[in-house]
Amino acid sequence: MSLSNCARIVYFADRDIFYSVMATPLAIRERLFPIYAFNIEIARIPWVTTNPDIAEIKLLWWYEFIENLSADTYCSHEVIEPLKSLIFKHNLPKNLFLKIIESRRFDIYCEPHSGVEAQKKYLRDTSGALMELALRILCKDPSDCSISFIKKIGFCFGVSSLISALPDLYAAQRQPLFCCKEGKCPSLIKTFRECATSREFALQELAETSIKLFYEARSQQTSVQDSALLAALPAFSCLKILKAARKSPKVILKQRFALSLLTKSFLLSKLVIIKKI
């Protein structure tokens, strides 16, 4: 029942991840759904209360629970029980879970990231850590190349997910992009001289960085384990989203970017059949 609950949580929160998991064999789905359900539970916390103190307490509870988790720990939570089983069965590193929880504290508040490096760290510690967990749960001994590959894909996936949510985040009075003011980011001004606003600077910088990382990961894919490609399935549409943001940041900032169901189905099917990101 707990596994079904995890699948239900993912289905209602993120259809792209749900269908990418459903594209894997049954035995793999049973391992992936609890990981993604955990991530959704953590990501929700800053949004289910308007009181920052309550959100901080909830994240702290999760942090301390995971940090002190043992095989004998019992909790009736629909996500924790299957997650605990996976953590000890597959020897998953707790620090990756803790990075995800700690990084989500940023989402509680309305201030932007202090700079591009702060935002990159946030993306590495959320989506990057999540995809590394997916890899480690599918592969007992992942190679260095596979880990490097999935970290890059995870970062790109995080940026593409952020891009899709930008209009909603700004409507909710959040500042999801790093602070980039003219005169303080000369490298960006030189590269993106035609951008009109700080948000466009920031968005194009993240998109450009992510596209480069994506192509670096693509060049590695012939050397990675099959498990790494399975773990990368949720990123099936991220390159298309990243290119759209690089090309038209002003449009992306004003209206939610969404691919058609047909396009998504084609991209996911292509990745599953050809096994190339």
Image (cartoon, grey):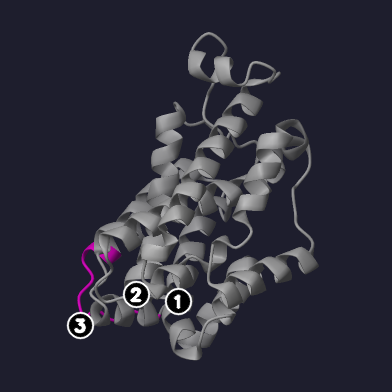
Q: Are marks 2 and 3 in contact (CB under 8 Å)?
A: no
Quadrant in the picture for residue 250:
top right
Answer few, some or many: residues within 10 Å of disc 2's Cα (few below 14, many 20 plus, some between 14 and 19): many
Q: Position of residue 150 (x, y in %)?
A: 40, 59
Residue 94 in the image: state x and y as whole percent. 26, 63
Residue picked out by circle 1: 32
Amino acid beneath label 1 = Leu
Q: Is residue 194 visible?
A: yes
Residue 260 shown left or right of residue 81 in the figure = right
Of the two numbered discs 1 and 2 on the same chain, state the one appearing first in sequence.
1
Pick the front one: 103 or 159: 159
28 or 266: nearer the viewer = 266
Residue at figure coordinates x 57%, y 12% from the top left: 182
Q: Is residue 72 above or below residue 244?
A: below
The residues bearing labels 1 and 2 have C-alpha atoms spaced at a distance of: 8 Å
Query: From what the image shows, is residue 263 above or below residue 51?
Result: below
User: Which residue carries the number 2 mark?
Assistant: 137
Decide whether residue 35 is among the magenta residues: no
| 245 vs 95, nearest the viewer | 245
Give the foreground label among 2 and 3. Answer: 2
Q: Which residues are magenta?
A: 66-76
Q: Main secondary structure of the magenta part?
A: loop
